[in-house]
Amino acid sequence: MDWSVILDPFASVQLPLSQWANESMTWLTSNYRSFFQAIKAPVKWALDLVEDGLRDSPQSIIIIVFTLFAWQVANRSTAIITFFGLIAIGLIGAWDPAMTSFAVLVTAVAISVAIGLPLGVLCSRVNFIWALVRPVLDFMQTIPSFTYLVPVILLFGIGNVPGVIVTVFFAIPPLIRLTNLGLREVRADLVEAADAFGATPFKRLWSIEIPLARPTIMTGVNQTVMLSLVMSVIASMISVAGLGRLVLVGISQLDLARASIGGLGIVLLAIIFDRITQGFGFTRRDRGDRGLWEQGPMGWLRGKLRHQN
Amino acid sequence: MTEIMPHQNAIDCQNLWKIFGARADEALVAAKNGEVDKDEALKRFSCVIGVADASFSVAEGEILCIMGLSGSGKSTIIRHVNRLIEPTDGQILIEGRDVMGLNPKELRQLRARKIGMVFQHMALWPHKSIADNVAFGLEVQKTPKGQQRAAAESALEKVGLGGWSDRYPDQLSGGMQQRVGLARAMAADPDILLMDEPFSALDPLIRKDLQDEFLKLSREVKKTTLFITHDLDEAMKMGDRIAIMKDGRIDQTGTPESIVLRPETDYVSRFVSSISTLKYISASEIMTPGKAKSGAPEFGASTPLPVLLAAFTEGAEELAITDGETHLGRISSTDILQAVQTDLKRV
């Protein structure tokens, strides 16, 4: 008898996984290509909108608009950081790729929030759905990101739009997780009190549970933003333009100059984007009992107008 | 004005059972047949009996205290009244209407308009201002904003917190927070208040203040109140009647006097043994048959002990107990001393 089959079984017995992967991919591309192309359309529309807006506008206008926006949703120090951050990006010669990266980032984060928040809410309501979603999230977070670049290229092609899709895939899990976690961790007696006063399930969610889970949910949004930036280098391997590509080219050509421009640009973008998204998480109380539109430049303008009347 | 409505209880709870666990139905049948008690149910069905065959009623304007130690099921019972918990068996009637028969919308209306609830740990929403906390019940009913604010401010005024509207819960002390809790429960002017150990998390002195204020307020607004407490002194003070719970069952229901003077079970008598009966003893309990000397001061049968004592200290040798014309008995100084002695031995 040949003992080698028992001692070293995997030398001869193997599952044809690679064959299955190829076959299923072929099957998907040949039968459902139109479906995946259809997913691309709205992403492309949103991305073009942001990117065209950023590329066609004069640089100084963009700096002013972003600074005012940061002041509006967050505070003055965020506005100052945004102002000097953008100037620094311009000065290191990373303006154009930064705008492209910014467009990909904004689109990816917007899509992630649009999908992740409602899904997180749903997971926190229905245990059965959470039981299904959880292993999927585990899978999404543990599989190396290079692995899914191949099927994405086969299904969606290359370029910025597939770049947004892989970025969403990479960045969305923590948002779903933390939204679910935050809502499940809201103190039970505070939820019960809302019920005791006759709140509908929606009213309870909107006025009590989401505000109370806000710090955790905002941590999720923040994670999504940061992971989207991390992805920009990896996504550049499927020909996504922007700062990530500078880094990738820098690596492949051992070009320290380009790599540092791309790297520094990503860090600056991260700081700006992080601070602004944190501003969205401020409560009315954090803003000194003022609403979002009662502070910053809008508040100043409203004050002026009221004075004149 | 004469009362033309037939007498109706504000809250009627009939043979309420609540059993937690997957096999609650089996456990219910067994428990109803007397086959299992609390421990047995846990062993055989892995079910916890929260409430077992509890019946009580609260008349309009009355304060009923449900007293029991932790785990006795008192907090579970009170949550059945506004159906925060669904019963395993039994009925809850609010002004004659079966709470279990309400659809979700009717149930929300009942909770928003008819019933106000105060919680042990205040359960104020930290992200809402005091006024917004208090007005939430009205906000839920889509009351106009101005009206919400006015109602919230008047409710806060009632509990002595006028001018605190725009603060946040974490800026208030524990006692003040519970006043907000009370204002929130009363803002929508409900007929029924459910108070789940409202004062037990507070310091003794603040607790006493709030108890006194609540009694005063309660006499003014005449709200039907179901009051949960683990503190017998509090129950004696707050309750028109008291129900004593043990292991999910109501052992005895009655006025504070009858609970102290005539405990029906060992558990209740052990419980009340630390309470002095002197405050609750009346002439009828200590008088002896026979006619008093002529000229002895006359008192009714329900005269409390302190009043009788006062008569002796003013120089009376004997008291005549009468029911208007008829002579019921007499009390000598020996009788009254014996009563005090018995009480002292008891405690």
Image (tube, rainbow, N blue to C red):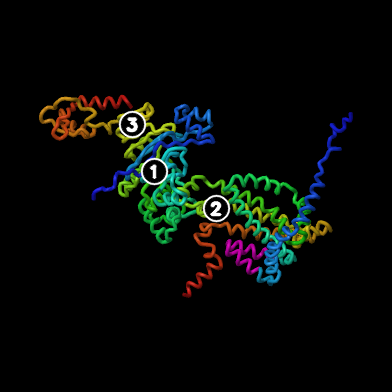
Query: Taken as a whole, is the magenta stretch helix, strand or loop?
Result: helix
Q: In the image, B72: left or right of A45?
A: left
| Crowd band around label 1 with a 10 angstrom C-alpha radius: few (<14), some (14–19), many (20+) | some
Q: Estimate the x, y position of residue A147 in percent, counting from the top left.
A: 77, 50
Q: Estimate the x, y position of residue A102 in percent, counting from the top left.
A: 69, 62
Secondary element under disc 1, as helix, strand or loop, is: strand
Q: Nearer the viewer, residue A218 or B103?
A: B103
Q: Amino acid at mark 2?
A: Ile
- Identify the residue position indicated by label 3 in the image: B275
A215 versus B279 height, above or below: below
Q: Earlier in the sequence, mark 1 or mark 3?
A: 1
- Identify the residue position indicated by label 1 in the image: B93
Q: In the image, A273: left or right of B125?
A: right
Q: Name the residue: 33% across, 29% down.
A: B263
Q: Amino acid at mark 3?
A: Ile
Q: Estimate the x, y position of residue A10 in percent, counting from the top left.
A: 84, 37
Task: Mark 2 vs mark 3: tell me if same chain.
Answer: no
